[in-house]
Amino acid sequence: MFDILMYLFENYVHSESDVFVEQSTLTDELLRAGFNKPEINKAIDWLDQLAALQYSNESPYLLATPQHAVRIFTDSECQVLDTECRGFLMFVEQTGVINSTTREMVMDRLAALDNSAITLEDLKWLTLMVLFNAPDSQQAYEQMEDLIFDEPSEVLH
């Protein structure tokens, strides 16, 4: 399912193409690209749930979220996110790229992926997807883009 999300993000969102495409047209395009229908449906549901998280007045993430709270990862979250991924989430939160609300949205969407493990690169893209859909997050989105695309190619000493 993550491959479908990446395909959609790269071909519609990141390329600045028309984002508002009929679901049937999108499904047909994804089928032609080689994805299977059950995975396509899961990806579309995932995106619908992301939109609901960010624009619903009943979203638990938009209600009062304590600032400066420390996130304790559960055992199951630690199985999906290795130390590098958890460290990255802490880094982007501490540097102000995301806040605790956005972090929890990322965690929610990670859980919905139903993957046994996620790479740091996947986590970065998923965070970018969440920020793209988050209201008033243009600057954070741009900072996250910089973290993805402007990484140094060699080790700095």
Image: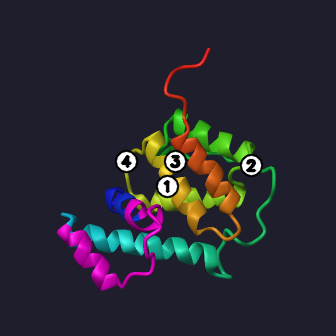
Pointer 4 residue: 116
Q: Residues within 10 Å of mark 2 (few under 14, many from 20)?
A: few
The stretch in magenta equals 9-32
Contact? badges 1 and 3 (CB < 8 Å): yes
Secondary structure under tag 2 reads loop
Q: Position of residue 16 (x, y in %)?
A: 47, 67
Q: Position of residue 130 (x, y in %)?
A: 56, 62
Marks 2 and 1 sit apart, C-alpha to C-alpha, by 17 Å
Q: Amino acid at mark 2?
A: Gly
Residue 58 vs residue 121, the one in the foreground = 121
Q: Amino acid at mark 4?
A: Ser
Q: Main secondary structure of the magenta part?
A: helix
Above or below — where is 140 with respect to 25? above
Q: Amino acid at mark 3?
A: Lys
Q: Between disc 3 and disc 4, whose residue precedes?
A: 4
Pointer 2 residue: 96
Q: Between disc 3 and disc 2, whose residue precedes?
A: 2
- Colour scheme in use: rainbow
Q: Between disc 2 and disc 4, whose residue precedes?
A: 2
Specify whether residue 143 is in view: yes
Mark 1 vs mark 4: in front: 1
Q: Residue at x 38, y 74 (%)?
A: 44
Q: For the view shown, which residue lies furthest in the top direction?
A: 157
Q: Residue at x 57, y 40 (%)?
A: 86
Q: Is residue 65 magenta?
A: no
Secondary structure under tag 4 reads loop
Pointer 1 residue: 126
Q: Residue 24 appears in which quarter of the rendering? A: bottom left
